Amino acid sequence: MPVFKEKLQELYTQSLDGRIMPELAQHEPQYHPWLEYNGSLTTYNELFLPVFRPGEKLETIAQKSLTEKGSFIGIDLCGQGDFLAELGATAGLSVCLGHDYKRCQEPTGTIVKIDADLLLNQSWERIDQWIADHGKPDLVVCAPGSGNRYFFDWQRENTFPKYHDYQYHTYSRATFFALLWKITDILAENGVLLLDFQHSEKRFLWLQKSRQYWLENPNLYQQLPGNIAVDVNLKEGVLAIRKIPAANNPTITRTTILKT
């Protein structure tokens, strides 16, 4: 089943004139929405500290999975994935528009790196095939950096500098929800999704308001698949979604919204 409905996908590709790949991947890194932020293990731990449980960090998430399952599967979306090897992933995947091997490690037999646009169904066909081959991820990190502008561009086409060489589409709400639903759905039982809404974008007031629309909206989380617990920090613009076994959370989605 495709992630994005046929009409949404058609509108998205039309709005970009089909230019999202490969032309964007050829831009200098400072202009590249998903190359701009290559999170290290330390950086990601600091970024998601506001939504970690007491004593929790990426290392403890990985170690818990390794101890309980004997394996740890991780995915870095909109990032270059080097931290997965540091965590001892038995299988890892990183996805961004284009990997810059002057700034990140080459792929290995354990860590696979693919160049793909997350807002295209054909990209998710590749990701789904990787999951079918390796298993559902115990950890997904999604820190888009400037890619946030894709997700929060609500009818603001052609308002940004032309050096980006693409146009923004007007269907971000539906597209972003489909993306969030999909990422939540692929999580393994007891898996954790860490999502950053704010990196490098605090200066845009309209983005801040857009983020709050999502982060303060419990109805959004209630529509996501599975039994989940959601921790949100509005000030820092980050959230954690955790898949909880049905026996531990049989009827409700627990949402904790922290404003500071």
Image (tube, rainbow, N blue to C red):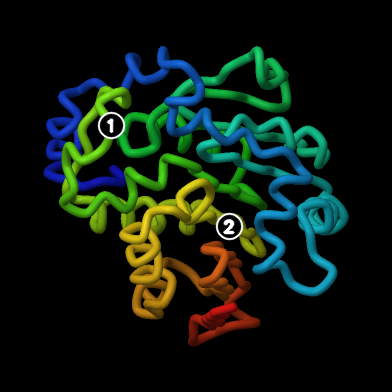
Outermost residue to the front? 203
Q: Is residue 110 left or right of residue 34?
A: right
Disc 1 residue crowd, few under 14, some 14–19, many 20+, Cα 10 Å? few
2 or 1: tag closer to the N-terminus: 1
Amino acid type assigned to the residue bearing label 1 in the image: Pro
Pick the quarter of the image with the N terminus.
top left
Q: Is residue 110 left or right of residue 236?
A: right
**Disc 2 versus disc 1: nearer the observer:** 1
Residue depicted at 66% across the width and 39% down the height:
39
Considering only vertical position in the picture, is 36 above or below 22? below
Checking the image for residue 193, the label placed there is: 2
Q: Could you say which is closer to the camera, residue 124 or residue 245?
A: 124
Q: Could you say which is closer to the camera, residue 215 or residue 178?
A: 215
Residue depicted at 34% across the width and 15% down the height:
22
Rendered image quadrant of residue 119: top left
Distance of label 2 from label 1 (alpha carbons): 32 Å
Could you say whether the residue bearing mark 1 is in a helix, strand or loop?
loop
Considering only vertical position in the picture, is 212 above or below 48? below
Expressed as whole percent of the image width and height from the top left, the position of residue 103 reads 66, 19
Pick the quarter of the image with the C terminus.
bottom right
Residue denoted by label 1 = 161
Expressed as whole percent of the image width and height from the top left, the position of residue 218 reads 40, 80
Expressed as whole percent of the image width and height from the top left, the position of residue 230 reads 55, 73
Residue depicted at 55% across the width and 20% down the height:
99
Checking the image for residue 135, the label placed there is: none
Amino acid type assigned to the residue bearing label 2 in the image: Leu
